[in-house]
Structures are given as structure tokens and as C-alpha cells.
Amino acid sequence: MTDTASRSERLLVFDGDDTFWDTQELYTAAKTRIFEYLERFGGSPARIAEYFEAEDIGNVATLGFTLRRFERSIRDTIEAFCPPGLEESWNVDASIASVLESIEEGPTPLVSGARRLLDDLESLYRLVLMTKGDPILQEHRISSSGTDSESIRR
């Protein structure tokens, strides 16, 4: 690419999660809620977290970077640490639904400085958002970050 290349010839691709939106806090808070409950049954916080992360990495191969993968990893971890029969009294499905809702519906603030950086780069590059994430969730993140889908797609 030369200095004389036009904006339309210059392409800059970025990922949304934790590049544009600060999403890690949503997932960390969701895991903490589940892990704190599981600690009641004698699992150490480090062991529960370690188990979850191993399951989550393994689930990426089949479920990708989706909320369904995260849900599967939570379910796997609950099955490993929750005593048999207690899942029903805990109402696991409602707890998991609540945790997933906090991620799906939670605010997804822009990473500090992201808007300014994108505004500065927009005159020089054609900007493209590329993600492996769930399309519906990514659309929510676009709209909840104060950016409309059309401005992202320019």
C-alpha cells in the first residue's frame, strides 16, 4: 500500500469483543456468580475456575465463540462440582438463564478511547468489524454501545 492509496483501498479489520467493547467484565461477573455457589460444596475457587477454563477451551472446537459454548461450559462445571440431586433444588436452569441474560442484555461499554480511535482512523481506512461471535449478540453490542449497525457497516 502506498501513501497515495485511497481510503477505499485501505482496509482495517478489527474484532469487537474486548477490542471495541469491554465484554470481559460481563463474562467474569457471570462466572463469579456460578463459581461462588459451587464453592459451597467444597470446591476450591481455583479448582472450579481451572475446570471451567479447560471445559471452555475444549468447547470452542465444537461450539465456537458463542454464548451457547459459554452455557455448555457452565453446565459441565456445575455437573462436576454440584452434588447429585442438588441441581433441582438450586434450580440450575433458572440460574444459568439469569447468568446468560446478564451477558446478553448487559451494557457493553466501549473500551476507553475506542470511539476516538475509530473516528481518527475512519478518514484513512475503510473499517470493518469481523467477529466469530453470535450475530444476534454482536448486534446487541453494537446498539448498546451507542453505535448503530449502519455506521459500523460503512
Image (cartoon, grey):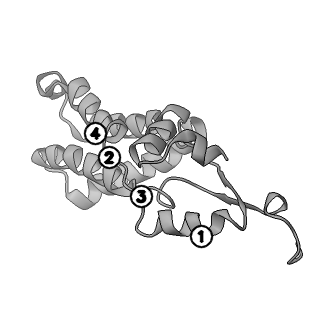
Q: Is residue 33 above or below residue 9?
A: above
At 13% from the left and 50% from the top, the residue drawn is 42
**On the image, numbered disc 3 is attached to which residue?**
110
Q: Give the mark, 3 or 1, whose residue is nearer the N terminus.
A: 3
The disc placed on residue 102 is 4
Q: Is residue 78 visible?
A: yes
Q: Give the mark, 1 or 2, whose residue is nearer the N terminus.
A: 2
Q: Amino acid at mark 3?
A: Leu
Looking at the image, is mark 4 or mark 1 nearer the viewer? 1
Q: Which quadrant of the view contains residue 5?
A: bottom right
**On the image, numbered disc 1 is attached to which residue?**
120
Q: Is residue 17 above or below residue 117?
A: above
Could you classify mark 3 by the number of other residues whose Cα lies within 10 Å: few (under 14), some (14-19), or many (20 or more)?
A: many
The disc placed on residue 20 is none
> As rendered, which of 145 and 150 lies closer to the eye?
150
Looking at the image, is mark 3 or mark 1 nearer the viewer? 1
Q: Secondary structure beneath disc 1? A: helix
Tell me the distance, in whole angstroms, between the alpha carbons under discs 3 and 1: 16 Å
**82 with respect to 122 (left or right):** left
Tell me the distance, in whole angstroms, between the alpha carbons under discs 4 and 1: 32 Å
Image quadrant occupied by the N terminus: bottom right
Q: Give the mark, 4 or 2, whose residue is nearer the N terminus.
A: 4
Q: Secondary structure beneath disc 3? A: loop
Q: Which quadrant of the view contains residue 9?
A: bottom right
Q: Amino acid at mark 4?
A: Ser
The disc placed on residue 107 is 2
At 44% from the left and 41% from the top, the residue drawn is 143
At 48% from the left and 65% from the top, the residue drawn is 114
Tell me the distance, in whole angstroms, between the alpha carbons under discs 4 and 2: 9 Å
